[in-house]
Structure formats: C-alpha cells, structure tokens
Amino acid sequence: MLIKSRDDIKPSEITSESQYLNRRQLVAGLAAGAIAAGCSRADDAKPSVNPSPKSGGIQVAESTQYSRLEGVVTSPYSTPETPNTFDEVTSYNNFYEFGTGKTDPAARADTLKPRPWAIEVSGEAEKTGTFDIEDFIKPHTLEERIYRLRCVEAWSMVVPWVGIPLASILQQFKPTSKAKYVALETLVDREQMPGQRYSVLNWPYREGLTIAEAMHPLTIMAVGLYGRVLPNQNGAPMRLVVPWKYGFKSIKSIVAIRFTERQPATSWNLSAPNEYGFYANVNPDVDHPRWSQARERRIGAGVFSPKIETLPFNGYGDAVASLYDGIDLRRNF
Amino acid sequence: MATVMQWQACTMASTCGEISRRNAVMTTRTTVRDPVRWFGKPLVFLLGLLPALWIGLVAFGIAGNGLGANPVEALLDFFGNWGLRFILIGLAVTPLRKWTGWTKLTWFRRMLGLFGAFYVGLHFRTYLVLDQGLLLSAIVEDVLKRPFITLGMIAVLLLLAMTLTSTLAARRKLGKRWQQLHYSAYVVGILAVWHYWWQVKKDITEPLVYAGILSILQGSRVWSYVQKQRLIARQHPSEQVKLAKN
C-alpha cells in the first residue's frame, strides 16, 4: 500500500476531525477575545511541516493530520523558490464546488470523500473503462514537484506538489492516433460538493489539454502536497497541475478522463469566452478584459511587498514555448 | 403666493435637507438638548468606527483569524464593503424617514455619508499603496483601461467633493449649488454597486443584493417625487410648472 494510513484512520475522517477542531478554535478564539491577544493560535497546534510564524488565515488542519506519502523522490523540474506555507496553500483556494469564497473550500471540503474513488477512462484509447484511484497511483513513482502556481486573478503561490507525470498515467491506457486532446471532469455530487447546489458554473467542472500539453513532462497529476496526502480543498484525491497555465486549468477531484479528436469544451471558457480561452497560458502581454495580467501578488510576501512581474508561460517558457510554435497566443489566449 | 413659497421652502427642507440660515439657527437652539442628538450622535459615531477598529484588531492578530493568505485583498474587500454599506445606509435615511415618520433620522445622514467616504477612502488608499505600490504608470493604466476602476475613481472624486463641502459653512456659502453637488450621492450609490458588480469574477450574489437595496431606496425616491408632483398639481394647479422647474 502506497498511502500509509496512521491508526487505520481514513484521510477524510482526519480532515473532518481537524475541521471540527478548527471550529472549536474559532469559537474559542471569539469567546476568549482579549485573552487570546498576542498569542498566536498556531502555538496551540501540533507542529506542521512548515510552521508559519505569522500563521494568518483560518487555521486549517495541520499538515501532520494528513498521511505522509512514502517513496517520494525529488525532481529536477522543481523551482528553487521557497514554497508557500502549508497554511497558505490549504486556506486560500478557488474550488467553487465548495463555495466561491477563498476560505470556503478549507471550511467546507470535509464533506468530500476521496476514498474509495473511481475514474472513468473513455474515448480514443485502447484501454478504457472504470478504474480505481490506486490503479493510477500504484504503478508509478511519486515525485515532488515544487511549482509556481499563477491564478488568473493575478495572485501566485509556490506549491510543493507530490504527483505523477500525466504522460506516465495516460500511456497506461494506450491512446490511439486519433487522440488529439484530453478532456477531464470533476466529480458531480451535491452532497459531497455543496457548492454545486448553485449554478455559478455549469457542473461538472470541465477542463482539457492538447495531447502534446498533456504528455509534456511538466504536466502532472498531483495526489499530495508537502509530502502528504492531498487535502480535500486542494482537489483530493487527484488533480491536474499544469504550471505554465492559469490555475483554473488545473482541474481538481478528477473522475473522468476522455481522449478526444476534437477540442473539448472547458468550464471557464463556456462561462465567459471573451475572458477565458482554451489555452489559458500565463501571458503578461494579454490582459484579462477586466484586469492586468502584467503583475501578480505573491501570496505570503507580506502586505507591503510590491507585486512581482508575471513571466510568459509563468516562467516555464524554455520548456513549453515550442508547443505553441505558429500559434497566435494573443488570439488563442 | 407667499404660502406657496413657504410651503415650497418647507418641502425642500424636509425632502432635500436644504436648510436656510434661519432654520439652521433654530435647529441648533431647539434640538441641542434632545437626547437623540447628544446621545445618539456619539453612539452612531462609535458604531461607525467599529468596522475600522475590528479590522485593526484582526490585522494585528488580536481578534479574529487574521487577514488570511492574501491580506491586501482582504483589506480591499473589507473597506470596499463597508464603504458601500455606509453609502447605502446614508441613502436610506430619507426613505426611512418617510416610511417611519421619524424626522430626527436626518440628523445622522451627514455622519453616515461621511463614514461611507471614510471607508471608501481607506479602500482607495489600500488600492493605491498596498495593491498598486504607488506605481503611477500602473494606476493610470488601470483607471483608463479598466472600466470598473474608472467607475470607482469617479465615485472617489465625487465623495471627496462632498466630504470637503460637508460643513455647514460650505453649505451656506454654496447655497443652491451645494444641493446640486450633493445630489451626486445618488450617482455614487450607483457607481459603487456597479464597481463591485464588474469586479466580481463570477458569483454576483452579493452585488445583486446591494443592487436590490439601492433599487428599493431610489425607487422610493422616484415614487415620492411622483406623489409630490400629483399633490402639487391637485392643490396648486397654477404653480405646477413653476415648481417642476425647481
């Protein structure tokens, strides 16, 4: 078994316990008021992998409450930049399936049950069908990939993902020559994902990549972060990470993979085609119609730090720019 | 004729807050000892400061759960929200007074409007200093290229003009033009909701709620105006045209 469970407690149960503790901390914090003054609430908590002295935001479950992933190797594709803290990565999320607020996923994602988890593979491939999540993870070596993540909302983080190159996973299913694109879908379940009761997006959340993008060595399926099982609010049990594209391309909690001949429809593009394209490569020269993409706010940099310059392809241009030779990236934004 | 003029002045005073020099003096004499004034005004003042106090405590880790992973965004949202709320509360004074018949509500209108300007000012300064880092080129580009920033900027300028002319002295000096200038509170209300609406990525629930409140408030003003016109038409048919011009 690749994922080592402590005391036979499922990660989902641990999450919900931690959320329970959170609420207690919140209530205690409100009640204590002045008593709590000056005392960082992180001090009361168990140590985390990367304890954050400032410890802002909702106290999300400490990382120690997620099972450690075994046999994770490092990768030359990792950035040497300092990752954001576990707290930042797990408390500031866009995951509309749990609400549109940034702290909603951390507060509400305990309803998601990431095990057991089935993924349907279909379309232009020799091997199709419904598979268990372990079939995606077990045959592969887990790698730590420390990547920059640039959100289309002009903020960014550095996240130490743990994952598997998507190419390794996709090759298991022997895609045919007709497979020009890969379409991916998130779970639809109003009980597990209460945000889906509101039609803010047209569920299920859908994303897609060209086969070349999907097979690129930088593209991974993440199953963890900070060396531990992926927290629910980050897209458990398995989510895409495409570091040179805006964050919304990196679809979470995937239940379906389809190899297609035609470009698949994608959620944000369907929702606002003039604002979000299919490619969604990070590009400082193509502004969002309503805000600039030239600069980004690095989460955790501090209130008085200026925004930093956004790099083409989020700084991964050397590795991926050739994928777009001959494509007008202003039109195909 | 004289009675019509008096009636007109009286209506103006109660509907638009236009207070003549004589009325202002009378107001001071008769109401200074009214507990609604000497107790209510400091109370509303302290209540208006509460959001600022709260966010200060949160920012320094004394209360709440901190500003979160993106404190600049948290401050922008917090001040923007409270600016919008106070603008709408200020705009609610006149309709509320009409619905409840409690005329003393008008005493709080200026303070509520100024709190709106206060929080919008904090929102604006957070944008200038913390969000844009006082990078002039980026700010100018934002104002010119992003319609929602343009709207916000116009609202800020109108609020500034109203704040600077909010004293009784300025009101006396500007006379009729004071009222015209301060009608821009209606414009600010629309701009503020619009600014919020365009800024939201997808979930427009909250801007929709504010737009609904604004529609009710402004709708009631239109309705009152229509009712008044009818009343005038019935009681003083010959004066109708003259009053309508005002």
Image (spheres, rainbow, N blue to C red):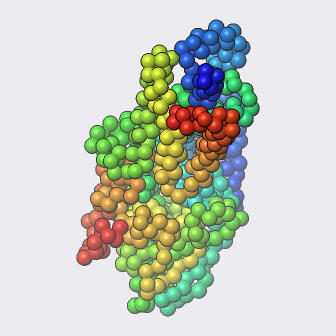
**Quadrant of the rendered image containing residue B244:** top right
Q: Residue at x 56, y 34 (%)?
A: B243
- B226 vs A99: above or below: above
Instruction: From the top left corner, tell me how far across and down residue A26 is, in percent.
Output: 67, 39
* A104 lies left or right of A219: right
Q: Is residue B40 above or below residue B190?
A: above
Return the residue nearer the eye: A12 or A103.
A103
Is residue B16 in sight in this rendering? yes
> Which quadrant of the rendered structure holds the N terminus of chain B?
top right
Can residue A41 be seen in the rendering of this structure? no
Q: Nearer the viewer, residue A238 or B183?
A: B183
A269 shown above or below B107: below
**Measured from the top left, where is residue A113 in percent x and y?**
67, 65
Q: Residue at x 48, y 44 (%)?
A: B191
Q: In the image, residue B121 lies at what x, y percent?
A: 46, 32
Out of A1 and A75, give the one closest to the viewer.
A75
Q: Nearer the viewer, residue B240 or A189?
A: B240
Residue B164, image x, y percentages: 43, 24
Asked if residue B159 lies left or right of residue A27, the reply is: left
Q: Residue furthest right?
A: B100
Residue A24 appears left or right of A88: right
